[in-house]
Amino acid sequence: MLNIVVCVSGGGTNLQAIIDGIQNGAITNTRIQAVISNNPGAYALERAKAHGVEGVCISPKQYPDREAFNEAFLERLNRYRPDLIVLAGFLVVLPKAMTQQYKNRIINIHPSLIPSFCGTGYYGLKVHEGALARGVKVTGATVHFVDEGTDTGPIILQHPVMVEPGDTPKSLQQRVMEQAEWKILPQAIDLIANGKVAVEDGKAVLL
């Protein structure tokens, strides 16, 4: 059984996709141990509660500095002994100690086809604003392992989404979530839970 901890900062639509995937059998051999948010107002915590999953908020505002927050965050995370950490819209830079301790055991969903529109500054609507400003015809989403860079870890799955005439950042964001994110994040978790993903020479390989 793959024990996962899901880290979320906002509404938790990707968390909901994971919960639904476990319930409908799209994700097998997996259990959500806890949901951690850095935002006390995150609706994701309500989603966790509604489904009987422990939800906890660890906010940087509760600590005197970032180092103290990082220590507290990692200490709480370690309590759950996760096999996999899933970043599902988590707007916090992970401490180096965490990426090292959980090497190739942290995954992230990013709303573009990496390496496009990713890295520092590209998050949330900013990704879709960038795609529309550049005039791309195809965008999408990527699930990747997390390393010490920003959106630089091995890519597990990607799924394309067509940009349509008249798209706004908001409409494009919604379609990328519906057509890509909510599909490939559960799919990646299921692959990992069943031993079908490996990292070889810095690249993720599907077995």
Image (cartoon, rainbow, N blue to C red):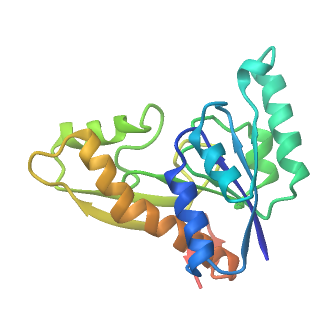
Q: Residue furthest front?
A: 50
Depth check, front residue: 90 or 150: 90
Q: Is residue 6 left or right of residue 149?
A: right
- Residue 84 percent location from the top left of the image: 73, 62
Q: Is residue 180 left or right of residue 31?
A: left
Q: Is residue 3 above or below residue 174?
A: below
- Residue 48 percent location from the top left of the image: 67, 52
Q: Residue furthest left?
A: 165
Q: Determine which quarter of the picture holds residue 123.
A: top left
Depth check, front residue: 11 or 137: 11
Number of numbered tags placed on the structure image:
0
Q: Determine which quarter of the picture holds residue 65.
A: top right
Q: Residue furthest bottom?
A: 207
- Residue 90 percent location from the top left of the image: 59, 42
Q: Is residue 164 above or below residue 168?
A: below
Question: Does residue 155 appear anywhere in the picture?
Answer: no
Residue pictured at 55% horizontal, 79% vertical: 26
Question: Does residue 129 appear anywhere in the picture?
Answer: yes
Q: For the C terminus, which image quadrant?
A: bottom right
Residue pictured at 80% horizontal, 37% vertical: 73
Q: Is residue 120 left or right of residue 33?
A: left
Residue pictured at 40% horizontal, 54% vertical: 114
- Residue 88 percent location from the top left of the image: 57, 51
Q: Is residue 69 above or below residue 198?
A: above
Residue pictured at 87% horizontal, 49% vertical: 78
Q: Is residue 173 left or right of residue 134?
A: right
Q: Is residue 37 above or below residue 61?
A: below
Q: For the N terminus, which image quadrant?
A: bottom right
